[in-house]
Amino acid sequence: MADEVILLDYWPSPFGMRVRIALAQKGIKHEYRDEDLSNKSPLLLQMNPIHKQIPVLIHNSKSICESLIAVQYIDDVWNNKSPLLPSDPYQRSQANFWADFVDKKVYENGRNLLWTNKGEVIEAAKKEFIEALKVLEKELGNKSYFGGEKLGYVDVALIPFYTWFKGYETFGSLNIEKECPKFVGWAKRCVKNESVYKSIPDQDKVYQFIVEVRKKMGIE
């Protein structure tokens, strides 16, 4: 009996993109359902009753919530192709550390760049955002990917935020490539990977989404 795999998601979500990339990298056939977050489906509310958020991976009627947990689950269950996490416990712990760093430093500061019009908040977020990318550049070193020569767990955790860069640059008055050229070089390398470019939307499309949300929020 074939596995039934469903992904409840929302197209601009960088967290959903992580799961999409992992599924694509493993070649896992699945049903994609784009949620209306203003009118969440009964299935989403049933499968993620605690947070009621996307993404939710449903595997044979069992739900896996939270994007990084879902990516690890995918890697563990479909472990015969394209491993994302290292098998060595120490290296695995380091991958988990950097994925957590992405959420706490890249996502959080990026969010502050987009969804506020308070100058002092934006300036502080801009500084920490660039500092975080520089730390990641140092960790990347001379490797092609954070996973080494192949796309790995940290790459999957981080690359979705590249789709939001036009928004970060516009509303944060940033030039990310000028500040962090090695980081942008890594990102451009990642998006050449079929699993990535087929799983993430265009930056311009995400930017238009950001503009519309800012209008609804009354942010000038």
Image (cartoon, grey):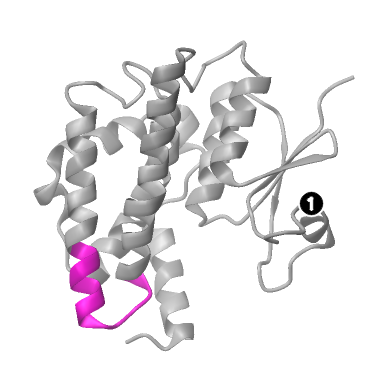
What count of labels does the image hold?
Answer: 1
For residue 174, what is the image quadrant?
bottom left
Which residue is located at x 23 percent, y 48 percent? 132
52 lies left or right of 162: right
Task: Reply above or below: 123 against 75.
Answer: below
Which residue is located at x 15 percent, y 48 percent? 177
Residue 30 lies, in percent from the top left, at 72, 34
Task: Reply above or below: 38 against 151.
Answer: below
* Stretch of the chain drawn in magenta: 114-126
68 lies left or right of 98: right
Residue 26 lies, in percent from the top left, at 59, 22
For residue 146, what is the image quadrant?
top left
Farthest residue to the left: give it: 178
Residue 94 lies, in percent from the top left, at 37, 27
In terms of secondary structure, where does tag 1 sit? helix
Query: How packed is label 1: few (under 14 Cα within 10 Å), some, or many (20 or more)?
Result: many
In the picture, which quadrant includes the N terminus?
top right
Please tell me which residue lies in front, 56 or 198.
56
In the picture, which quadrant includes the C terminus?
bottom left
Q: Which amino acid does label 1 sit on?
A: Met
212 lies left or right of 174: right
**176 drawn magenta:** no
Residue 8 lies, in percent from the top left, at 70, 50
Residue pointed to by mark 1: 47
Q: Is residue 163 visible?
A: no
**115 drawn magenta:** yes
